[in-house]
Amino acid sequence: MTALVINLRPIINLTDDEFYEFCQHNSDLRIERTATGALVVMPPTGGESGHRNADLTTDVNLWNRQTELGVVFDSSTVFKLPNGANRSPDVAWITNERWNVLSVERQKKFPPIAPDFVIELRSETDTLKDLQEKMREYVGNGVRLGWLIDPQIRQVSIYRPDQPAETLQSPTTLSGEAVLPRFVLDLSRIFG
């Protein structure tokens, strides 16, 4: 099962508040919105992907608890990107300085901010092409470091601003570089 894309424009143009309410009334669905206003309804992940996602979020969150440099978000968090898209990376992280600039009201809804760091984990229902486009969108909207992890082919693509994606085959670890200082992700649980 792949994602279902529903084009509403030009008939309906949901405001940010209407999109938020729509998502609240359909909380059993995983919904994103493209920059052109199309709704993307994503299928739920299976147990294997859910377990891997939990491991990734845990690893980033444990690092963040030690460093206290920012805020970690799971795959159910929707971010309003500068281009108008509403996206939900599998794991996201934002520096404290950038997060604390947002009002409490903006933090509660779909935060209007691009994360500093994102991870997308390819599940059985994801197409690689769609995830690559999403990663380019993230970086084009201000994400400073992004990892597209594909356990199906044991491959990681690293996305950085103003650079082509770097693809690694079967890496054992990934560095958080300057964005996540001293963070090293052990991929043995993801690729194992």
Image (cartoon, rainbow, N blue to C red):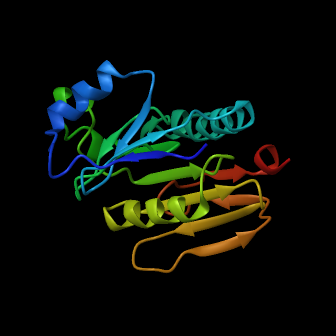
Task: Give the left or right position of residue 150, taking residue 138 as reference.
Answer: right
Q: Work out whether 94 lies above or below 168.
A: above
For the N terminus, give its image quadrant.
top right
Q: Residue at x 72, y 64 (%)?
A: 155
The residue lying furthest to the front in this view is 11
* Pick the front one: 138 or 127: 127
Quadrant of res 101: top left
- Determine if residue 48 is in view: yes
Q: Give x and y (percent) for residue 44.
A: 57, 33
Res. 97 visible in picture = no
Q: Tell me which residue sits at (50%, 36%) in the image.
A: 75
Indicate the position of residue 2 as horizontal and vertical percent values: 56, 47
Say left or right for 135 vs 35. Answer: right
**Please, which residue is most extreme toward the right here?**
192
Q: Residue at point 59% right, 59% down?
A: 148
Q: Which is nearer the eye, 11 or 132? A: 11
Residue 147 sits in which quadrant?
A: bottom right
Question: Where does residue 73 sit, x and y in percent of width and height?
Answer: 45, 36
The mark total stands at 0
Q: Residue at x 62, y 35 (%)?
A: 45
- x%, y% of residue 127? 59, 57
Q: Is residue 25 left or right of residue 172?
A: left
